[in-house]
Image (cartoon, rainbow, N blue to C red):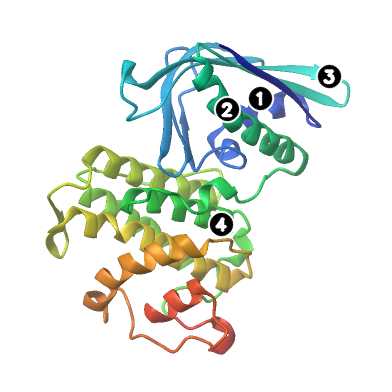
Amino acid sequence: MTYAKTVTLPVAPEDAFELVTRPERLRRWMGVTARLDLRAGGDWRWTVTPGNVAAGRVAELDPGRRLVLDWGWDHMPGDDGALGTVTITVEPVDGGSSVTLVHEGLTPEQEASHAEGWNHFLERLEVAGATGDAGPDEWAAAPDPIDEIVAGEAALAVLQHVLRQVGPEAGPLPTPCSEFTVDELTEHLLDSLVSFGAMAEAELVRRDGVDLEDTVALLAADVIEAWRRRGLEGMARSPFGEAPAPVLAGIVPVELLLHAWDYAQATGALITVSDELVAYVSGLAEKLVPGGRGRAFGDEVAAPVDADALTRLAAYSGRTPLALV
């Protein structure tokens, strides 16, 4: 069976091709993380939604016009998760470009489920083509099932949307972390991500992205991919000694979500997060925060009476909304 659909975008073909191949632009309509070695034979890997990772190789490339991917799902049993090929073709049309996506090699049942997904994301591509960003994806908001790694992916999706709203002029602004400006918070976050990768037995380094969001996204994706490789079994090492791997992996979503709140408080950026995700991450925080008070976290403060779930989590971690400082 074959799925095929064409959408029209009000952008030039070169811009349309970037929307479907450049990771920092893919994340604006499809995927929490994206890695793509854009050459024939290159590897690619997309976290389409939290907990759902697609990966494979680039089968063919006609730069600016056509991309063929060997499509598969990580962790899917049978044939290494292989599910045919996806061909994306970009062509000029009056007023912009057409993007045609063809997914071949599916069973009838697979075609039906993939059609639902492709229709969802191609609608988001149309929005991104018109506005530059399709905004938070409701499919990423409250993953089920969820664990520490999936929660990290969902929290990263929240953080990325906030960081897209933060311009370089925000660098000197204060944050709810009283010792950090926005620029200093970014340095702290990037250093922390390198440390979180080490806990997952990976030696990671920073890579400069095209902007703040991209720089954080690249490193955070490396951290989460490292935890996926390592898994949640057994004990893991940290600068504070050994601990159960799920406890250390749980630091990632706690930090990403709290810092998303910090950036939003500092800059006035819109933050969109589900109560379900906040509730899960709050459960992780209850295992981490008490032992980290005085170092990573301050003493609990009273949350405003009308506080939302994330602001209550921030108060538990020792943060006060800037408007009340």
CB under 8 Å between callouts 1 and 2? yes
Q: Quadrant of residue 187?
A: bottom left
The three-letter amino acid code for the residue at tag 4 is Leu
SS state under label 1 = helix
- In depth, the one of 168 and 105 nearer the eye is 105
CA separation in Å, label 3 and label 4: 33 Å
- Residue under the image location 42 percent in, 13 percent down: 41
CA separation in Å, label 3 and label 2: 20 Å
With respect to residue 287, does 103 lie above or below? above
The three-letter amino acid code for the residue at tag 1 is Phe
CA separation in Å, label 1 and label 2: 6 Å
- Residue under the image location 56 percent in, 89 percent down: 324
Residue 17: image tag: 1
CA separation in Å, label 3 and label 1: 14 Å
With respect to residue 195, does 118 lie above or below? above
- Please state the horizontal and vertical placement of residue 186, each as a whole percent of the image: 45, 61
Decide which of tag 3 and tag 1 comes sooner along the chain.
1
- Residue under the image location 71 percent in, 24 percent down: 14
- Please state the horizontal and vertical placement of residue 56, each as a whole percent of the image: 41, 21
Decide which of tag 1 and tag 4 comes sooner along the chain.
1
Decide which of tag 3 and tag 4 comes sooner along the chain.
3
Q: Nearer the viewer, mark 3 or mark 4?
A: 3
Residue 163: image tag: 4
In the drawing, does residue 192 fall left or right of residue 181? left
With respect to residue 11, does 324 lie above or below? below
- Please state the horizontal and vertical placement of residue 84, each as a whole percent of the image: 47, 13
Decide which of tag 3 and tag 2 comes sooner along the chain.
2
Circle 1 residues within 10 Å: few <14, some 14–19, many ≥20: many
CA separation in Å, label 1 and label 4: 24 Å
SS state under label 3 = strand
Circle 4 residues within 10 Å: few <14, some 14–19, many ≥20: many
